[in-house]
Amino acid sequence: MFEQQNLIEIANRTMPFGKYAGRRLIDLPEPYLVWFGQQGFPDGKLGVLLHLTLEIKINGLEKLINPLKK
């Protein structure tokens, strides 16, 4: 589940739509990610990355992602 490429994408990919458009996935607020979890994550790669980002935040692992930012 924690594939290296996914972690790099979480650190550098930006949210493509919504209130937090343009913000890196790892920088999205946890309550926003929880809301997505309740509503249903988007299909495809973005949904996988958002779900993984939520798991990282819930477990307090954001500091592991920060060095991967470009």
Image (cartoon, rainbow, N blue to C red):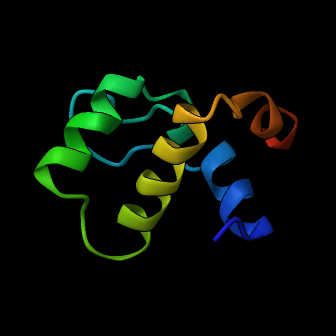
- Residue extending farthest to the bottom is 44
Could you tell me which residue is drawn at 76 percent across and 39 percent down? 65
The answer to whether 45 is drawn above or below residue 41 in the figure is below
Could you tell me which residue is drawn at 20 percent across and 36 percent down? 35
- Going by the image, does 18 lie left or right of 15? left
Query: Quadrant location of residue 18?
Result: top left
Instruction: Give coordinates of residue 27: x percent, y percent.
Output: 54, 27
Q: Closer to the camera, 69 or 39?
A: 39
Instruction: Give coordinates of residue 44: x percent, y percent.
Output: 35, 76
Could you tell me which residue is drawn at 11 percent across and 49 percent down? 39
Instruction: Give coordinates of residue 40: x percent, y percent.
Output: 17, 57
Could you tell me which residue is drawn at 45 percent across and 29 percent down? 28
- Residue extending farthest to the right is 67
Q: How many marks?
A: 0
Query: Quadrant location of residue 48?
Result: bottom left
The answer to whether 28 is drawn above or below residue 44 in the figure is above
What is the quadrant of the N terminus in the image? bottom right
- Going by the image, does 7 lie left or right of 56? right
The answer to whether 10 is drawn above or below residue 67 in the figure is below
- Going by the image, does 8 lie left or right of 24? right
- Going by the image, does 26 lie left or right of 46? right
- Residue extending farthest to the left is 39
What is the quadrant of the C terminus in the image? top right
